Amino acid sequence: MTLPRIGITTSFANGKQMVDQHYIQAVAAAGGLPLIVPMLDSENTMAAFLDLLDGLIITGGPAITQNMIGALPDDLAPTDPLRTRTDEAVFAAMRNRPVFGICYGMQFINAQAGGIIYSDIQAHKPHAIAHSADRGGHDHDVQIDSNSRIAGIMRREHLVVNSYHIQAVAEVGKGLRAVAFGPDGVIEALESEDGRTMGVQFHPERMGEAGLPLFTAFVDQCRVWHDRRQPG
């Protein structure tokens, strides 16, 4: 069986690229070949690397600083400009391939589509609960649109998810739709209208078997894309 090649973005700090091992394990468990996306100065070298990929996972990270409502709170650092530039270039190059955004990754996809981000949901969204563990947030229920792709993947309309974020989607970008919501109305999942892109606000890579269907469906989608682009 073909192992779809899944690019995984990284964080960047103090001259080091870093990625949580949970992402790598989840992709491998779902039948994909995880490939860490390097941060490269050479456009030709980056293009050659991206040509290898069948899909892209944009991982969690610090703060989105594009299209924000309000200023960043003191307990949330902005994303390093090198990561921002790399994510923008990689996402633009992968627009015709499957993309899965997780936490920061979902917010990033939304912002790239012209959507608006709450810099701090507790400060700017009325009645929002704490979604950050550092602020006392806990696992909570999510309601999933029954007509969504994610509901079909999970085979349910309710899900208990973890919560590790301070920012959130305030207004959905062009070509996307919100398909899952927390108890306070915070958007917990997005899908593109063409079915190529999805994003979740929670971290399924840290949910064990409960989160694995999202990775399996994504890897399967990447396998279809891989097979379609093969000659003959």
Image (cartoon, helix red, strand yellow):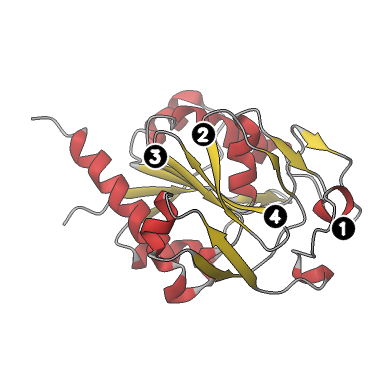
Q: Distance between the residues labelled 1 and 3?
A: 35 Å
* Image point (40%, 63%), residue name: 154
Q: Position of residue 55 (x, y in %)?
A: 38, 43
Amino acid type, residue under disc 3 in the picture: Gly
| Position of residue 62 in the picture relative to residue 190 (left or right) | right
Amino acid type, residue under disc 2 in the picture: Phe
208 and 174: which is toward the camera: 174
100 and 24: which is toward the camera: 100
Q: Distance between the residues labelled 3 and 2?
A: 16 Å
Which residue position holds label 2?
A: 91
Secondary element at image label 3: loop
Q: Distance between the residues labelled 2 and 1?
A: 27 Å
Secondary element at image label 4: loop
Where 179 falls versus 94 (above or below)? below
Disc with the residue nearer the chain's start (1 vs 3): 1
Which residue position holds label 1?
A: 75
Disc with the residue nearer the chain's start (3 vs 2): 2
* Image point (59%, 32%), residue name: 88
Mark in front: 4 vs 2: 4
Contact check, label 1 and label 3, Cβ < 8 Å = no
Disc with the residue nearer the chain's start (2 vs 1): 1
Mark in front: 4 vs 3: 4
Which residue position holds label 4?
A: 185
Disc with the residue nearer the chain's start (4 vs 2): 2
| Position of residue 223 in the picture relative to residue 143 (left or right) | left
122 and 209: which is toward the camera: 122
Q: Where is residue 231 in the image (x, y as percent from the top left)?
A: 13, 30
Residue 195 is marked as 3
* Screen quadrant of the C terminus: top left
Secondary element at image label 1: loop
* Image point (34%, 56%), residue name: 217
Contact check, label 4 and label 2, Cβ < 8 Å = no
